[in-house]
Structure formats: C-alpha cells, structure tokens
Image: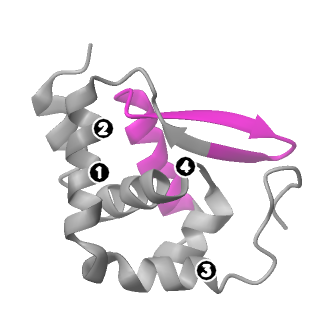
Amino acid sequence: MIEPQEVFKSLADQTRVRATLLIVSQGELCVCELMCALDDSQSKISRHLAHLRSTGLLLDRRQGLWIYYRLNPELPAWVHEVLEVTLRANTQWMQGDVLRLQNMDGRPGRDVACR
C-alpha cells in the first residue's frame, strides 16, 4: 500500500505531476506523447516515468518498441480523488500541455506504435 508521503513526494516535481495529470486525463499515454505534450527530451521523461512507476503510481505496458503508461488502478481511492480534483482545478495550468498533445502530428492510436 502506498503511503501519503510517497504520493506527495513523487508528485512534488513539476514534470512528474504534469505527466501524471496528463495520463489521468487521457487514460494512457506513451512516452512519445508525453515528450510532445511536455516539450521535453525522451531521457528526462523516461526518468520521471520510471520514478512514478517505482513508487506504484503508474503501470506500464509494452507495445512493440514503445511503452505506454497508465495510473495504477489498485491505488487507494483517495489517490484517484486527489488527482481528479487537482486536474479539474488546474485546467489553465495544464492548457499548454493539453494543446501540444492534441496538436501532435502522427499521434499514435492504441493499436499502432509511436513513430
């Protein structure tokens, strides 16, 4: 079971909280989508995702060469609630990330690999 201090410590970094909120809003995102939305390098995004996965906040699945991330459905209900409330209360803060994601050229479907 994940403890509150682990959740909040993991989300104290801006890149990790933005990635997590994007994943909450979309259900699942691959590394290339997060790179586009967050306008950052693959290595930085992957490092932060690995941290979130190691704490149990995210789960991943491999599809070909790409890895897709989603919120761990077995997290306590309070974690899901905190993330949903945070997402709804911060739409303006997330607006640039969401727009970059929506405008991503060649955005993959869930049945094809990222380009």
Write the residue at 57% across / 44% down: 69
Q: Which residues are magenta?
A: 43-68
Q: Amino acid at mark 2?
A: His
Q: Amino acid at mark 3?
A: Gln
Q: Amino acid at mark 1?
A: Glu
Write the residue at 39% across / 40% down: 51
Sooner in the amino-acid sequence: mark 1 or mark 3 = 1
User: For mark 2, what is the residue?
Assistant: 80
User: In the visual, does 115 lie left or right of 34?
Assistant: right
User: For mark 4, what is the residue?
Assistant: 27
Distance between mark 2 and mark 4 Cα atoms: 12 Å
- On residue 102, the disc is 3
- SS at badge 4: loop
Distance between mark 1 and mark 3 Cα atoms: 20 Å
- SS at badge 2: helix
Q: Position of residue 34 (x, y in %)?
A: 55, 65
